[in-house]
Image (cartoon, grey):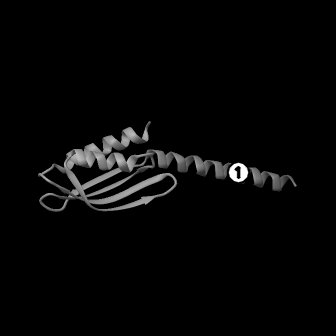
């Protein structure tokens, strides 16, 4: 009986440790990749902690930068937001500027 109780408690400790580590990893993921693939075409990949209104905020930022989304693929899970998009800028935009704008937005949205 004591061995069964010990194994049960040990199992609960392992599950709790795994859950803590999972939530830590999810809350610290912030990945933004921007690649210029043509004159004014970009591929953007975003992966971060899920946040309310994040997609809307990203689309509004693109609009402010005068950048159109040509195609987008979204993956939304319980805790994680993922987006891959092809963008078209109406003027030559530095990929670093796009990267920094998206990263700043994500940091603001996911830490509030």
Q: Label 1: state its secondary structure.
A: helix
In the drawing, does residue 107 fall left or right of residue 96? right
Residue 85's quadrant in the figure? bottom left
Q: In which quarter of the image is the C terminus?
A: top left
Q: Residue furthest top?
A: 112
Residue drawn at (68%, 48%), measured in percent from left and top?
13
Q: Quadrant of the N terminus?
A: bottom right
Residue 46 location (% of width, % of height)? 35, 54
Residue 96 location (% of width, % of height)? 21, 47
Residue 51 location (% of width, % of height)? 45, 46
Q: Which of 107 and 70 is in front in this view?
A: 70
Residue drawn at (75%, 50%), measured in percent from left and top?
9
Residue drawn at (35%, 51%), measured in percent from left and top?
31
Callout 1 environment at 10 Å: few (<14), some (14 to 19), or many (20+)?
Answer: few
Query: Which residue position holds label 1?
Result: 12
In the drawing, does residue 110 fall left or right of residue 19? left
């Amino acid at each position: 009986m004591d061995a069964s109780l010990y194994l049960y408690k040990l199992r609960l400790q392992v599950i709790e440790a795994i859950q803590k580590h999972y939530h830590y990893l999810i809350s610290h993921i912030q990945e933004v990749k921007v690649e210029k693939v043509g004159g004014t075409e970009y591929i953007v990949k975003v992966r971060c902690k899920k946040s309310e209104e994040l997609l809307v905020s990203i689309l509004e930022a693109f609009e402010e930068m005068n950048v159109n989304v040509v195609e987008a693929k979204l993956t939304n899970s319980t805790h994680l937001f993922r987006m891959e998009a092809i963008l078209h800028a109406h003027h030559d935009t530095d990929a670093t500027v796009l990267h920094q704008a998206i990263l700043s937005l994500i940091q603001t949205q996911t830490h509030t």
